[in-house]
Amino acid sequence: MRGKVLHFDEQSGKGIIVSQSGERFSFTNEDVKSKMSIYKGMEADFIAENANAKEIYLSEALYNVSDEDVPYYEEQSSGFRELFSAKGCYTRTQYWKITLATVIIWALFFILIIFTGNGDQYSVDMTAMTLFIPIFIFLLLPLFYINIVTSIKRFHDINKSGWFYLFSFIPYVGGLILLVMNGFMPSVKEGNIYCRRKKADN
């Protein structure tokens, strides 16, 4: 497979190659077989293994790689369809907007349960239950899924795999780890392997 070096960090020894079809592959300095300095724009011949480039041979010829022609970052729109797709990235602002909206809806649901319990938060009549069950299935469960997807996209925004969401299952501190990483860490734009910048005509 042929492509070009899109990004390379000399300190970490890690970089990204973009193929002729626009796919991006991570690589390390150890994957490069050519004994030469690595620069952005170098032509590369490599073997693709999942999302990684292996057995890389670089050409001395340098080519101009435009960030507009080969986008590396996308601040994704918060449309309805995007809420259910784990692809792309959400910025901190998008993360907080979606998360706070879902939390408010959940809180209203539990307040509704308390008020229909005749003053007893542990007692809800059967009439109310026939209302709560459909709300839970058709509204709250999708919101729970949206929260997961939103967190995954925020991890992508900081150039981390969505599998980092598994930190949430760590007892006691998992939720705090998720909150700090998703809610406060800045976007990683240069060299981000998960996100693409929107074209101007999109």
Image (cartoon, rainbow, N blue to C red):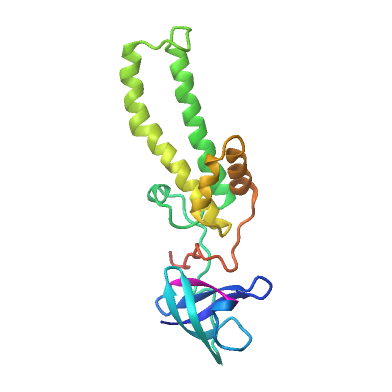
Give the residue at x 54% y 53%: 155
Q: How many marks?
A: 0
Give the residue at x 42% y 12%: 116
Dividing the image into 4 quarters, which one contains the N terminus? Answer: bottom left
In the displayed image of the protein, which residue is found farthest to the bottom?
61
Instruction: Please identify the quarter of the rendering in which residue 134 is found.
Output: top left
Of 39 and 166, which appears nearest the observer? 166
Residue 96 located within the stretch drawn in magenta: no
Give the residue at x 47% y 8%: 120
Residue 27 located within the stretch drawn in magenta: yes
First to last magenta residue range: 22-29
Secondary structure mostly seen in magenta is strand
In the displayed image of the protein, which residue is found farthest to the right?
11
Of 49 and 165, which appears nearest the observer? 49
Could you say where residue 117 lies in the image, as x and y percent from the top left?
43, 10
Could you say where residue 92 lies in the image, as x and y percent from the top left?
59, 49
Could you say where residue 77 lies in the image, as x and y percent from the top left?
47, 54
Of 128 and 161, which appears nearest the observer? 161
174 to 69, vertically: above or below: above
50 to 76, vertically: above or below: below
163 to 47, vertically: above or below: above
Dividing the image into 4 quarters, which one contains the C terminus? Answer: bottom left
141 to 119, vertically: above or below: below
